[in-house]
């Protein structure tokens, strides 16, 4: 089945630094979603991307839908302690009303 | 709106016991799903439903049963709990025309 590969698996950064993470697949995706999971909570949707090449921002977060439609990127600028958590990429397995497949996540730790 | 609610928050079972994890949403979403989250494995789909009376299997359905008698509720039944089912379980929902799923707070299950 379709798989999403996220990298890095984990990262430790200093407060104030910028963060980049990515998600790749061997299959084409028509939609990319980025979620954040705070410790002990359920994932929360951050950004949804629907078009190849699309660049969308949500505050300090910016995500891009790769031109090949096989990858997506998430950047966080000027990180703060509350950015700590696990970031997941996800996409529908096929077009239409179908389940999402999730990457294994990037665990972000911010050192104050 | 309460969004997606899950009960219980925590549960400990002995091997062989059965139980039902409850999930409810008040957003009139057609699509509902159950995931399990294990360390380093991301979110894996157990079962999903595209509407009342319709359910289908996900990636890891063995040992779990679901039904969808109403739009609002989507309970997950463990028929005979096994230690391998120790995990955190998340329920999610969305409109049928959207991939943007909303997650509940999770149920942490331990099977001894």
Image (cartoon, rainbow, N blue to C red):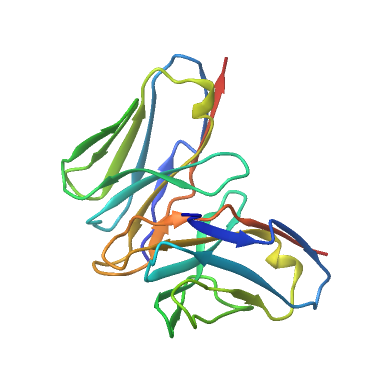
The single residue placed furthest to the front in the displayed view is B1
What percent of the width, then of the height, locates residue B110? 76, 60
What percent of the width, then of the height, locates residue A59? 33, 27
Q: Is residue A41 above or below residue A98?
A: above
Task: Tell me: B92 left or right of B82.
Answer: left
What percent of the width, then of the height, locates residue A109? 56, 27
Q: Quadrant of residue A20?
A: top left
Q: Is residue B52 above or below residue A55?
A: below
How many marks the image carries: the answer is 0
The front one of B79 and A27 is B79
The front one of B29 and A54 is B29
Task: Tell me: B67 left or right of B88.
Answer: left
Q: Residue at x 33, y 64 (%)?
A: B95
Q: Residue at x 29, y 60 (%)?
A: B98
Task: Tell me: A78 left or right of B67.
Answer: left
Q: Is residue B68 above or below residue A20?
A: below
The single residue placed furthest to the bottom in the displayed view is B53
Q: Residue at x 58, y 74 (%)?
A: B75
Q: Residue at x 25, y 56 (%)?
A: A29
What percent of the width, then of the height, locates residue A46? 37, 41
The front one of A6 and B78 is B78
Q: Quadrant of the C terminus of chain B?
A: bottom right
Q: Is residue B44 above or below residue A10?
A: below
């Amino acid at each position: 089945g379709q798989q999403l590969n996220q990298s890095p698996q984990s990262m430790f950064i200093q407060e104030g630094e910028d963060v980049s993470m990515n998600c790749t697949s061997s299959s084409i995706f028509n939609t990319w979603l980025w979620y954040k999971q705070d410790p002990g909570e359920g994932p929360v949707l951050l950004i949804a991307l629907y078009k190849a090449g699309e660049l969308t921002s949500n505050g300090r977060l910016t995500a891009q839908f790769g031109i090949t439609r096989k990858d997506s990127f998430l950047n966080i600028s000027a990180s703060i302690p509350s950015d700590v958590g696990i970031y997941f990429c996800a996409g529908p397995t096929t077009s239409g009303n179908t389940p999402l497949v999730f990457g294994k996540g990037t665990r972000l730790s911010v050192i104050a | 709106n309460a969004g997606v609610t899950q009960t219980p928050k925590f549960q400990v079972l002995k091997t062989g016991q059965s139980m039902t994890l409850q999930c409810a949403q008040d957003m009139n979403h057609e699509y509902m799903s159950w995931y399990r989250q294990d360390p380093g494995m991301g979110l894996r789909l157990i079962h999903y439903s595209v509407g009342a009376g319709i359910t289908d299997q996900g990636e890891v359905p063995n040992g779990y049963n679901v039904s969808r008698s109403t739009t609002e509720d989507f309970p997950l039944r463990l028929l005979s709990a096994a230690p391998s089912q120790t995990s955190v379980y998340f329920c999610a929902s969305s409109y049928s025309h959207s991939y943007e799923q909303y997650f509940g707070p999770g149920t942490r299950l331990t099977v001894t």
